[in-house]
Amino acid sequence: HPQCLPSPQSAEYGTCSLRKMSAMEALELLDQLVDESDPDVDFPNSYHAYQTAEGIRRAHPDKDWFHLVGLLHDLGKVLALFGEPQ
C-alpha cells in the first residue's frame, strides 16, 4: 500500500539524530520562523500556539489532551528552519 511507505522526511527526521529538543524548546524555536501563511502577523508563533490551547481549554475544559494538541499543532513548522518547505 503506497500510503504505508515512510516518507523521506520520516527517514531523515524520524530518528531524531539531527537535533533533539523538548516541545517547549521547539515552541520557542518556532518564534524564529516567519510563517508564509501569516507573514504580516506581529506576534511570535508561540503566541498563536498558546492562544489555540487556551481557546480549546475554555471550550473543552474536560479534555486536557485536546489542550495539549492545541499547543503543539504547529510544531512541525520548525522543519522549515532546517530547509524543509513550508
Image: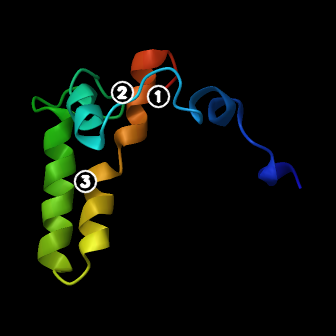
Disc 2/disc 1 C-alpha distance (Å): 7 Å
Residue at image mark 1: 86
Earlier residue among tags 2 and 1: 2
Image quarter in which the N terminus is found: bottom right
User: Is 62 located above or below residue 22 in the figure?
Assistant: below
Residue contact between numbered discs 2 and 1, judged by CB atoms under 8 Å: yes
Are the residues at dot 2 and dot 3 in contact (C-beta closer than 8 Å)?
no
Q: Residue at x 52, y 23 (%)?
A: 85
2 or 3: mark nearer the eye: 3
For the point 29% across and 23% down, the residue is 33
Secondary structure under badge 3? helix
Which sits earlier in the primary sequence, circle 2 or circle 3?
2
Q: Which quarter of the picture shows residue 27?
A: top left
Left or right: residue 5 versus residue 65 is: right
- Residue 71 marker: 3
- Crowd around label 1: few <14 · some 14–19 · many ≥20 (10 Å): few
Identify the residue at horizontal 27%, vertical 61% (top origin). 68
**Which callout, 2 or 1, points to the residue nearer the camera?**
1
Residue bearing mark 2: 36
> On the rendered structure, is 20 left or right of 31?
right
Going from the N terminus, do you reach mark 3 or mark 1 first?
3
Task: Give the x, y percent position of residue 77.
Answer: 40, 34
